[in-house]
Amino acid sequence: MAETPDELYALVSDVTRMGEWSPICQACWWDEGDGPRVGAWFTGRNELPERTWETRCQVVAADPGREFAWEVNNGWVRWGYTFEPEGEGTRLTESWQFLPAGVAGFRERYGAKADAEIDNRHAAAESGIPATLAAIKKAAEAGK
C-alpha cells in the first residue's frame, strides 16, 4: 500500500472502523475511555446470514507502525496486523489464529462437531482476510 506504516497503523488500530472493511464484523466499539493500547478492551458485532453475535476483545499488541493485534474471548483466537516498509509504502499483513484455549472451548461447546466448526471458522477467515485488506487499501488510498 502506498501509505507509511504509521499512517496505516493509525487507520487499522481504530477498531471502530472495522465494520467498514470486514465482510463479517459489522461494528466495533471501545470500552468507555479506551483506545488502541495493550490491555484495552472492545466489543465486536459479527453477522452471518444464519446468526449475529458479539465478541469481547483485548488488545495484546500495539506497536505503532509495526503491529496491532487482539485476542477474542480471553485467548480463543488472535487477530493481528503487521506493517512492514516496502519501497515507498507498506506491506500490510492480516493474520488469524485459533489458540489452544479456543480449540478446547470449541471441543467443549460442539463436541464431535468441533473440528467441522473450527474448519468453518478457518474458511471464513481465509475468505474474509483478502476482502478486508482490499477494503482497507481502498480506504487508505482514498485518504479516509
Image (tube, rainbow, N blue to C red):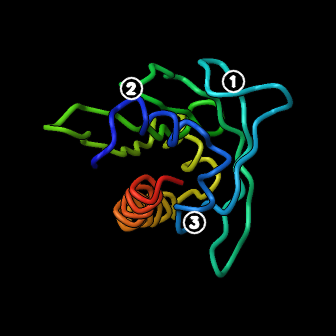
Mark 2, residue position: 65
- Amino acid type at circle 1 is Ala
Which dot marks residue 40?
A: 1
Residue at 36 percent across and 44 percent down: it is 95
| Residue labelled with disc 3 | 24
Query: Residue 1 at x, y = what percent?
Result: 28, 49
- In 3D space, how far apart are the residues under numbered discs 2 and 3 (Cα atoms)? 25 Å
Q: Amino acid at mark 2?
A: Gly
Task: Give SS at disc 1.
Answer: loop
Depth check: give the residue in front, 121 or 82.
82
Q: Residue at x 41, y 62 (%)?
A: 138
Residue nearest the viewer, comparing 33 with 43 = 33
Nearer the observer, disc 2 or disc 3?
2
Whether residue 17 is visible to the viewer of this picture, yes or no, is yes
Which mark, by number, is residue 74? none
Name the side, left or right, on which 112 lies relative to 137.
right
Mark 1 neighbour class, 10 Å CA radius: few under 14, some 14 to 19, many 20 or more: some
Precedes in sequence: disc 2 or disc 3: 3
